[in-house]
Amino acid sequence: MFARKSILTASALLAAGIGCASAADWSDTSIGYRYGTKFAEPFNNSDIKKNIFNLSHASGYKYGSNYFNIDMLMSDNNDSPTVNGVPNKQSQAHEAYVVYRHTLDFGKIAGKSLAVGPFRGFGFTAGFDYNNKSGDGYQSKKRMLVAGPTVMMDVPGFLNISLLQLWESNEPARAVFRKPGRYHYDPHPMLNLAWGIPLGSTGLSFSGYANFIAAKGDNENVARTKTKAETNIDMALLYDFSGLIGAQKNTFKAGIAYQYWKNKFGNDHNGPAGDGAYAKTPMVRAEYHF
């Protein structure tokens, strides 16, 4: 019942977002690429190379804003089913990860500015995460709904801070379930920061997100291990190279990125999940906006 309700709710949110985007006051759509050689996965002590292609869309309309992103992640053969902790390297993992967020802006709804002190505005955010992964043994099928209040900080560009409640479930292929079927973690909160800040007239911009996620109860395994609070920070420092290709400002950006992910997916990096649950990943990154 929960899974069906989650799918219906997510579909309604996406449909609402698409409808709002059709009457957008502004929009920004981009395709991007990231590459790193030190990605990590729990229960796997090998460094993993990943090529990541993404499509991203952000837009604002009369009452708020929409954000949609899909990542296509392609790993090398170190991200494979393991035997005694060692990848068998018979396959390469592939993953699709989708994020959608819709934020209602209370100031826009009221028709007046609600700015006060360091706050540009206030709102409410809802959305979902969805992933499918194959080739790694675990084969995640994450489904997650999110909802909670948001404050918009008064900075160049944007900095949004949200306190979101998460309802997450999974149905991986690995045969470690206490019982078959979709497993639902305990509802749990997340403090989320999302930002995109131009650094004056340098041509540089600093963007990214930070998620501070509370523990979500028991894991789905038969040992009933407890999940841990996790920290996931992904940030990029990009330079605007648009002039080199004769394009308008902020069309083509490239630079460096870094991901810090402690207790990845709620797995204790001091436990059996090992170093693979503690990612520290430098990357190169490029984006083309249109």
Image (cartoon, helix red, strand yellow):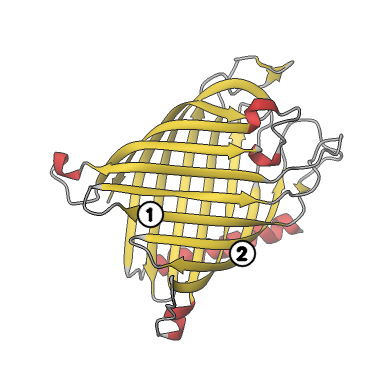
Whole-percent x, y for residue 200 in the image: 25, 54
First reached walking from the N terminus: tag 1 or tag 2: 2
Q: Left or right: where does residue 259 sit relative to residue 59?
A: right
Nearer to me, 131 or 218: 218
Q: Residues within 10 Å of mark 2 (few under 14, many from 20)?
A: many
Vertical relation: 273 (above or below) 185 = above
Image point (64%, 21%), residue name: 45
**Vertical relation: 110 (above or below) 176:** below
Taking the view exactly as shown, the residue that stands out farthest to the left is: 246
* Residue drawn at 43 percent across, 60 percent down: 159
Which dot marks residue 196?
1
Residue located 69% across and 41% down the image: 266
45 is higher (above) or lower (below) than 149: above
Which residue, as the protein is rendered here, is positioned at the far bottom? 111
Left or right relative to 58: residue 272: right
- Quarter location, residue 284: top left
Disc number for residue 147: 2
Position of residue 91 measured from the top left corner of the image (x, y, whole percent): 58, 19
Judge from the rendering whether residue 41 lies leftward or rightward of residue 173; answer left or right.
left
* Residue type marked 1: Gly
SS at mark 2 in the image: strand
Q: Residues within 10 Å of mark 1 (few under 14, many from 20)?
A: some
Kindly state the secondary structure of the residue where label 1 is placed.
strand
